[in-house]
Amino acid sequence: MSVRVRFAPSPTGFVHVGGLRTALYNYLFAKSHNGTYLLRIEDTDQERYVQGALENMLDSLMWAGIPHDEGVMLKDGKVVEEGDKGPYIQSQRLPIYQKHIETLLESGHAYHCFCSKERLEAVREQERQKKGTPRYDGHCRSISREEAKQKAQNAESNVVRLKLPEKTDIQFHDLIRGNVTMNTEDMDDQVLMKSDGYPTYHFAVVVDDHLMEISHVIRGEEWLSSTPKHVYLYQVMGWESPIHVHLPNILNHDRKKLSKRHGDVAAEDFRRKGYLPEALVNYIALLGWSPKENQEVFTLEELEHQFSLERVSKSGGVFDVKKLNWMNSHYLREVDLNRLADLAIPHLEKAGLIRESSSETEKEWIQNLTAVLRESIDCLSELPAKASVFFRDDIEIEEGEAQEWFRSDELKTLKEPLIEALRNVDDWQESTIKKSLKPIQKETGLKGPNFFKPLRVALTGNVHGPDLMLVIQVLGKERVLKRLETLPS
């Protein structure tokens, strides 16, 4: 079988991490089978359409590094389509849906429904009072095709519904959940075509997946209960049904589906906070899928080779921000310093610590700054707070051991020799700074912690931190001397 999969989001907002994982699993499955991964836009619910959401969604997927082979693309800021199965935007496919709805109406597998919203609500309320499944009572099923045609031609408001068989089991096999059976007594005569001429998701998804030759439908488990209707539609249309795969939800700590109520849930939220895309993708890959080996850090290429649907769990994975932070901090320590500086600059500019500049000297300084601080942050939005010590003239001395070293005799002894030695350093680099301090250690007899701890406290206010020589280099000669000169004697 030639593998063709799709991610088919609605342009109603930002890309949820659950949607991002669905896109990722489709991408990985396609890559692991030398298949095709396409992106289709499901925008038939025009009332929920959000201006700019499509561009944002495509941009987020590009940022995450999950490219698709076919469908809707963002090229030079413009939305374009690539592939021979288009249009890939559902609102541009209305004539296609109309053609196939006529086929269903003529075959008797669908019918016009003229019931008002008031009547439908009254029927649902009766079902709720009986504690039954709120569903349509089939009031318009008996209207003849000729009468329905006439009423529709007279512009009577109507929808088109699927005519399900009575008391019939519909079965399908899900690669994760096994065999699934649902009886039509527990299902509704689903609306296929709305009164505004737009198809519902349930109709458009079947038509599109068939015409786009989708081999595997990989989507969230919230669609599991709707799949029997889709399977039945494939049957009555005379089409072969794709293989279905329903992924477990991503959960919060209460084991409920992750939503906006629980904080950041969109890829854009994590991008804004300064998470690296490869860290986020690596983390969400593990929310529902378990590798064969006890490995947690993966490149995208490694995921492509190791991913399999057989190792996707039925139960949802809990989204743990602490684990994501650990993952991101790992990537921050490994990432190229030039790229890290480029990513850090917007955060430093937003905090007012630096101004926009293209100076090579400033860029090199920011690289050194990020090299100093990346061990102590989980995401780049934390950088300004950590970096402020490199921009302020005054510092705060941390409580506890730092206060003791700040008042110590060792620091009083070191003050003047340090000022003299560092004042004479012309080439302000780690190696020369370190070299200039060696005579002081010999002269004062202060070595190891007794030398470096009071010096670190004097310059940063903390006992512990990154490489002290690099810290001194990044602070700069003027600021280092000023801090030493203001020390109590």
Image: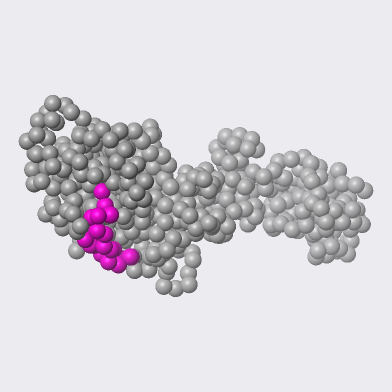
Residue found at the far bottom of this picture: 293
Left or right of 17, for residue 227? left
- Above/below status of 447 relative to 109: below
Left or right of 85, for residue 244? right
Residue drawn at (64%, 43%) of the image: 384
Residue drawn at (57%, 34%) of the image: 356
Residue drawn at (62%, 53%) of the image: 377
Left or right of 127, for residue 345? right
Say which of 474 and 350 sits in front: 350
Residue drawn at (70%, 52%) of the image: 471
Q: Position of residue 147 (x, y in %)?
A: 9, 34
Say which of 466 and 170 sits in front: 170
Question: Image quadrant for the N terminus?
Answer: bottom left
Q: In which quarter of the image is residue 149?
A: top left
Q: Where is residue 22 in the image (x, y as percent from the top left)?
A: 37, 54
Main SS of the magenta segment?
strand
Q: Tell me how the rendering is colored.
A: one colour
Say which of 453 and 231 sits in front: 231
Left or right of 70, for residue 154? left
Q: Position of residue 297 (x, y in %)?
A: 49, 64
Q: Is residue 40 among what the camera can see? A: no
The magenta stretch is: 169-188
Q: In which quarter of the image is residue 74?
A: top left
- Above/below status of 23 relative to 150: below
Q: In which quarter of the image is residue 481?
A: top right
- Above/below status of 332 relative to 389: below
Q: Is residue 487 among what the camera can see? A: yes
Say which of 107 and 97 sits in front: 107
Q: Position of residue 263 (x, y in %)?
A: 54, 46
